[in-house]
Amino acid sequence: MAPAAANYYSPSQHGAKQRGYRVCDQCGAVEQPTVSRFRLCGGCMTTQYCSQDCQKMHWASHKAICQHTSSAKQQVVGSGAVDEGLVKGLRKFTSAHATLLGWAGFQALQLKRLPANVRQNALLVELSYRPSASDPNRRFSVKGTHIVPRTYVTDNDPLVADDIRRREDRCRKSGGIGTAVILVQCGEISQVMPVEVDSPNRISWDSRDDWDDVLRHFVESGRTDFAPISTTARGIVYG
Ligand SMILES: [Zn+2]
Ligand SMILES: [Zn+2]
């Protein structure tokens, strides 16, 4: 029997161990999940910091992209009325499912085998919205997933393109392969999630081609406790 792709049926007991890509946007420190969780910027819910001091220090240079990301108007792809509840809901969704989305992007772009793909393509996750769902974690479901050229994201948004380039430079300097781009879209509202990816030999995540099913399962059931499986010398671990 094939091993599960993830903690599909039961929540992991081990917690996250190897999310080496979560770095403080100010000082570049790597998150050690067993010590303390990084704080998310409350504005964009995308950028992470190791401490309040780093967050304060970074604000002057982060302000533009932060306000751009959190501004509803900027996120509308076409024209039409902006649903503030949907915009906020989408940001919360992206933040709550950050590990799952990062893992799905890693698998969809086949980065273990084809690291250069990180610069060519992006994962587009298309969602549908159910505002009436009583559980806020179940207001979205996955309508479809698509691999799109990364220029789909960067060409029409220079601020986002700059932010991705900055993360990419930093990531490569520390030996990583670059920044994976995951685009979450619901109707005319979209949110970009950049994920800095370590070099393939430092990533122990198993390659999986059932990432689409796993993604749908966790989103559909409103579970935010996803942890990827890694096969290491110590055996199979979650994280
Ligand atoms: Zn820091
Ligand atoms: Zn921010």
Image: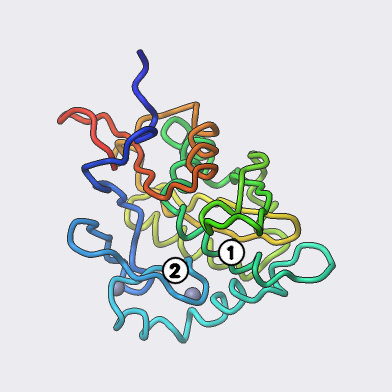
Tag 1: amino acid: Gly
Q: Secondary structure at mark 2?
A: loop
The N terminus is located in which quarter?
A: top left
Left or right: residue 153 versus residue 208 is: right
Which residue is at a point 37% across and 32% down the rendered structure image? 9
Q: Quadrant of residue 220?
A: top right
- Which badge, 2 or 1, is on the more N-terminal residue? 2
Which residue is at a point 55% across and 47% down the rendered structure image? 119
Q: Which residue is mark 2?
A: 47
Left or right: residue 215 versus residue 31 is: right
Which residue is at a point 46% across and 62% down the rendered structure image? 167
- Residue 114: x and y in percent read 48, 33
Spatial CA span between label 2 and label 1: 17 Å
Q: Which residue is mark 1?
A: 89
Judge by depth and name the residue closer to the eye, 102 or 198. Answer: 102
Mark 2 surroundings: few (<14), some (14-19) or many (≥20) residues within 10 A: many
- Residue 85: x and y in percent read 65, 69
CB at disc 2 and ligand 2 closer than 8 Å: yes
